[in-house]
Amino acid sequence: MADTTYISQLTSGKDPVEALQALAAEFPGEIVFSSSFGWEDQVITHMIFAHNIPIKVFTLETGRLFPETYYVWNRTMEIYGKPIHAYYPEHTALEAMVNAKGPNSFYESVENRKQCCGIRKIEPLHRAVAGNKMWITGIRADQSANREDMRDVEWDGGNNLFKFHPIFSWTLDDVKAYIKQYNIPYNTLHDRGFPSIGCAPCTRAVQPGEDFRAGRWWWEDQSKKECGLHVHEPAAELNDLKE
């Protein structure tokens, strides 16, 4: 039996690599890491691959990624010689949406955008994490206001597994310094004002002083800017015992 308190105790006082090693030992063959090839994810990928931690690395191949993202994906595999598992949208649902609404329907309404995210990201994610007990992410606390009240260990009721954010307390400067120290490949869009990188039609550079996620779905109200991959559970639910 494990709960969030037990996992917090297991990772407490450990650096991210030590925490990942402890979790991989606790959940052998049942722990995965999702990468979108941004700064934070490249740091964690390096930690996993460079230390041969038995954690499966996967990505959601939405079909609308930037060329720069595909480059860093390929370069990462070349450098580390490790697989990165791709999960694609279910083609029937994707074809039906595009046939009915066109390739850029997400610009027309929040409902359409959420449908597109659901098909291209949410459903593939469910398949990617199914059957696992732990999902590792690159979330940091200071990335947006609605993530500041999260914790580094959470229970994800929608996917029925624990989530752990190993660099949750890191600043962006910490991330950049780590990338420089270990010469980790990263997405060059970051150097051109893209702090958060998703699908190409839905991401733009941000201006000085703008919110970290202002470049994601910029045509929508600021309060709606999450795609549903990371749904924060109320704190009261976090310590429920889970098999």
Image (cartoon, grey):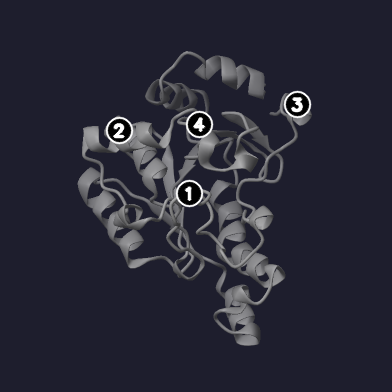
Quadrant containing the N terminus in the rendered view:
top right
Tell me what residue is drawn at x 44 percent, y 67 percent: 200
Give the percent coordinates (x, y) of residue 73. 32, 55
130 left or right of 205 in image: right
Front tag of 1 and 3: 1
N-term mark: 2 or 1: 2
| Residue of label 2 | 178
| Residue of label 3 | 240
Front residue (pair 212, 132): 212
Residue 64: image quadrant is bottom left
53 left or right of 132 in image: left
Front tag of 1 and 4: 1
Query: Which residue of the protein is positioned furthest toward the front in this rendering?
Result: 209
Q: Do residues under tags 2 and 4 come within 8 Å of each other at their CB atoms?
A: no
Front tag of 2 and 1: 1
At mark 2, the secondary structure is helix
Tell me what residue is drawn at x 56 percent, y 29 percent: 152
Q: Is residue 33 above or below residue 26?
A: below
Front residue (pair 142, 34): 142
Q: CA distance from mark 2 to mark 1?
A: 24 Å
| Residue of label 1 | 209
Tell me what residue is drawn at x 21 percent, y 46 percent: 79
Q: Is residue 140 visible?
A: yes
| Residue of label 4 | 168
N-term mark: 1 or 4: 4
At mark 4, the secondary structure is loop
The crowd level at tag 4 (other Cα within 10 Å; few <14, some 14-19, many 20+) is many
* Amino acid type, mark 1: Gly
Q: Is residue 165 above or below residue 205?
A: above
Residue 189: image quadrant is bottom left
N-term mark: 2 or 4: 4
Front tag of 3 and 2: 2
